[in-house]
Amino acid sequence: MEEKKDLSRRTFLGMSALGVLGLAGCGGGGPAVPQVDVQVPQALLDQAAALRGGSVGMLSQKLYSEAANQALDRSLQAFAQATGTTVSNDLVSGDAGDMVAKMDAEVKAGTSRDLAFMSDRRFVGQLHNLGALTDVTDVVEELRALYGEPATEAANYCVFDGRWYAIPYHFIAAGMYLRKDWYEEKGLPLKPHYTWEELRDNALEVSDPAKRRFGWGLTVNRSGDANGFIANVINCYGGAIADNTGTKVVFNSPETVAAVTFIGDIYTNPKYAPMLPPGIGSWTDSSNNENWLAQILGLTLNQFSVYADSKTKNNPVYANTHVFNGATGPAIDRPLAYGESNSFVVFKGAKNPDLAKLVAKFLVGGSALLGVAKGAPCLVNPAWDKVWDSDPYYTSGDPAFPALREQTRTPLPMTTTTGYTFPQAPSPGDQAATAAYLLTDMMQSVIQGTRPADAVASTHARIVQVFEQQGYKQ
């Protein structure tokens, strides 16, 4: 996994907490870290007694909010100090293209960290398929006794053959955002969801390049956001990468071609040029956040990082944001919005698996999670039902919280008229194809003039190759 140069290792020592406190409290001029008195529960202290003097290595998905990253530091510092252990934590980017391959190589070489947290939807299936993960069902059952059930999506992405291979940490909701003031000016309704066609037409209606108002803030350039956008439209139109078993490629279908035609038309038809902001064709994952916060976009699709940023930085766009669950299409009448969790995995060959599991149990709830959640409001949310009731912040800290909690309870699966159920069975092939940006490459070829049907057919062939590399014969 390629680590960005600005990401550093943080090491928290049980015997040198004062030095760590200085590191955790410095924000480099960024937002102040929410002051939460982090306490290690007595039950975990009792379990840690036999592990005193031990050390654990951890990988953390870099959170968009630096305040949340610093709050995580404070929680790890408190754990190390209270338990007399050492925790080394590396921040990493989930969009590094070779992330899974590098983690797997480290496991096979015996050089991996003990645990990591990452998107269960994007990565856990691949790592399990490679044999890189240990069974953590014992931890999940212990947490169930304490906190009730985890988010419904977790049972789909973390469970294989009835056993848990990842521990839900915090829930990340799916969300879309539009400028409610622009909609109101044009007399457009604010609704809990829209069709993709409505969103396209409304985006054009509210656009005014002379006023630096661009109604459409979704890119198809290589990025995680673009992957999510393209896949969602395809699924809403009735297409899918794989069948419901996650093993057979079914990408090349009339429904997929219709979806790709719809998307491609937005970026190639001169009619829609006024609603596209300058540079949208080269956007990365942070670009829509930056442009939304610059108040020039009328619509974007993002995790709640952009919402959290607008709130914590007192950006006027926060008050003008209408949050909704997503869009529908010809094959389904409710949004395919069920979120994902950043979940802990314990790697095969972990040098201190017991301490790794203890760190995970500590971080999923209580004051350890509260500071991180306050540092990234609405982006970091409890993954476990009873944690939502553990502090008034989760019930009254933001108007969006009730809807976010409901998303953790979304009845699953959802079924399209073409018979596909979402979320589908965890598919290493699907995850690998998405991580290789085959969907965004396909859209780029359409923008450059390839017929949608031809682009879908060639992408189908590339996806088949990826599935066969994952061991699924087609």
Image: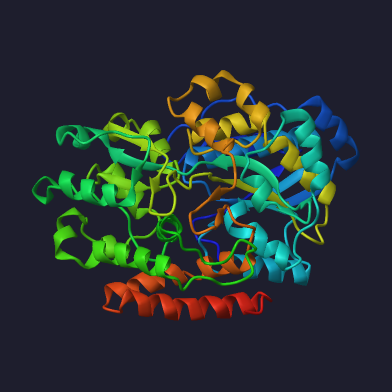
How far across and how far down the image is residue 218, in percent?
Answer: 32, 55
Residue 326 located left or right of residue 110: left
Vertical side of 191 occupied by 284: above or below? below
In front of the other: 109 or 378: 378
Q: Residue at x 72, y 68 (%)?
A: 130
**Quadrant of the rendered structure where residue 468 is?**
bottom right
How far across and how far down the image is residue 370, in percent?
Answer: 59, 29
Vertical side of 14 occupied by 461: above or below? below
In front of the other: 94 or 166: 166
Determine if residue 90 is in view: no
**Quadrant of the rendered structure where residue 276 is?**
bottom left
How far across and how far down the image is residue 117, in percent?
Answer: 64, 50
In front of the other: 22 or 137: 137
Q: Residue at x 52, y 67 (%)?
A: 241
How far across and how far down the image is residue 452, in percent?
Answer: 33, 74
Q: Quadrant of the N terminus?
A: bottom right
